[in-house]
Image (cartoon, rainbow, N blue to C red):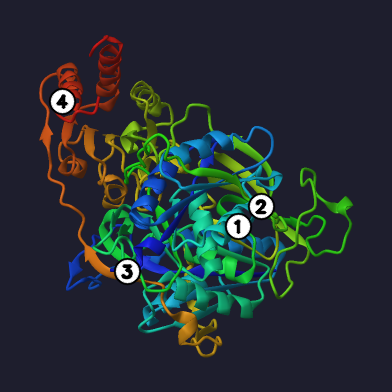
Amino acid sequence: MTDTANRTALVYAECMDGKLRRVALEALGAARRLAGDGGAVHAVVVGGGPGAALREAAAELAARGAGVVHVVDDPALAGFAPEAYAAAIGAAVAAARPSVIVLGHTAAGRELAPRVAAAAGGGHVADVTAIDLGDDGGAAAVFTRPLYAGKAFEQRRFLPGAPQVVTVRPNNLPVAEPVAAGSEGAIAALPYAAPPLWTVVRGIARKAAGTVDLAEADIIVAGGRGVRSAEGFAPLAALAEVLGGAVGASRGACDAGYCDYALQIGQTGKTVTPKLYVACGISGAIQHLAGMSQSRVIVAINKDPDAPIFGIADYGIVGDLFEVVPLLTAQFKRIFETPGA
Amino acid sequence: MQLVVLIKQTFDTEEKIAIENGAVAEDGVKFILNPYDEYALEEALRLREVHGGSVTVVSCGSARAAEALRTALAMGADEAALIAQDGLPDDGYAVAALLAAAVRELVPDLVLAGLFAVDRGAGSVALQVAERLGLPHASAALKLTVEAGSAGAGSGKGAGDAPAGAAGAQAPSGAAWGGGGGRIAVVERDTEWGVETVAVPLPALVTAQQGLNEPRYPSLPGIMKAKRKPLRQLGAAELGLGADDLAPRTERVALLAPPVRAAGRKLSGTPAEQAGQLAELLQREAKLF
């Protein structure tokens, strides 16, 4: 038995466009487990300037098991200056004195966690896909994470005494469930003095509204060289839209200039774990398979019956994607438009 | 401009991973310069073409990592330093400590690194180095330019020199060695909320995202020249680091093969029939909708 009662977990609850991200609730779920039954769970939400809808986010965290929600609302946090955000987390660390700090392994979390870990003299276990608490309530938890984008996995633990920073991969851990009415946590403004600001945000070319982020997407429709052109992605985008998913691509499609590198899935590019992955015109090079083979259900559509992608696909269609994909889109449109389907 | 590029030798991305006796088998494996570090190096070489100066590549790893440094020298880097640590602690904390100490000695104006390495994939060490050295960072660069700086960036000039859009006072970099020459890095970076343009004062650290550039191949004369370029070996003691500084924070307890994924079934019939079957299977069997 270790000092479970003294464990405190702190969550950096990331918001985007003023809304709490789902991965923040997944991180909160992880923090609650790591704190153990007798432990304390703190959360920190960060934002700044007019329109910062932090109260709503804080209330949701408090309703889902954060005992204390620290709110840092400061103009210095209006844009993403990593040093300012890391300092806000630092203020929460000073207030909560956590044994473990949990963030989402997102664009922002990936930038903040190393700074928070280095500032605390601690370790960082990144991109965690599973947590095994062991038998002493989280103090010696074992964290599973991918290597080589999922060609192998390792399990790591923190050595005694080290401050612990963990980033959890979106879509892999269960979200924190609401607590009983009446046991919601407290919400408090956290005093914060912005550090000297290095980062000046000059502008953002925002993604189109309604675009689903690849890392958090439940459904991904991805295209490879078989898509043949930038225009060839149109039927894939149509299917993704009907399914409420995101569009991804293989390295082949990106290298050929059919789409932006931001869409690339694989060992170079993004590693994704959606509920459904539809691979269209993707042969299945090993470096691509590494980035998507942990998806729950994989569908492959390819002209070549010998394409390696069929070796890991749950459902395969040998055929022309330009014929099959629009048929699928029509099929799902019908299904979703039929009441009670 | 003094440019430092942090590099790592990794498995080729086309390699399969085999686990033997609790370790990743390395026999017959092709090793490469981490692809993201290639983007970082290429960008450093291009910046040197514009601004002059020199490019030093630094790696921390086994003696084998010297191959990756030679590749970097063949691409055009001027000097290399290898922090060769046999029995290197298997932990980012120690690697960051070693790299930070080596970088500090090189008093760079700009440090470049890959967004992440394709083996561990954590993307943590370079930013830990930035934190240790008090450097601003801009992550996942898709475009990078170095410009004359704004107020407070160490140039001693007034705010009138600030480029348009850099509203407010920008704090100088926290690098202990000064440097930067009053310049700023302007970075277009890949984020989940769009492509964001930021300016940070030098010295700073910038990580390279895919799409930043098209890395050059080493030329034959480049390969010949690389053999005569300096490749220093550094040890922890020379960097002033003791066992306490390198004490790992985490350890690996197990290495696992991914769950085996068997091939499912191929559907048959006309394309329309197959589409119908697939929608049905995703609904009823996979219970996705």
Image quadrant for the C terminus of chain B?
Answer: top left
Mark 3 neighbour class, 10 Å CA radius: few under 14, some 14 to 19, many 20 or more:
few
Callout 4 secondary element: helix
**Of pointers 2 and 3, the one earlier in the residue sequence:** 3
Depth-wise, is mark 2 or mark 3 nearer the camera? Answer: 3
Specify whether disc 2 shares its chain with disc 4.
no
Cα separation, mark 1 vs mark 2, equals: 8 Å
**Residue B147 visible in the displayed image:** yes
Disc 1 versus disc 4: distance between alpha carbons? 51 Å
Q: In which chain is the residue bearing label 1?
A: A
Residue at left 56%, top 79%?
B102
Please tell me which residue lies in front, A76 or A57: A57
Percent coordinates x, y for residue A155 in the rendering: 28, 63
Pointer 4 chain: B
Q: Are the residues flagged by discs 1 and 2 in contact, CB closer than 8 Å? A: yes
Q: What amino acid is found at the position of numbered circle 4 in the picture?
A: Leu
Residue marked by disc 1: A91
Left of A331 or right of it: where is B105? right
- Kindly indicate the quadrant of the structure image that contains residue B276: top left
Mark found first going from the N terminus, 1 or 3: 3
Q: Which residue is mark 3?
A: A2
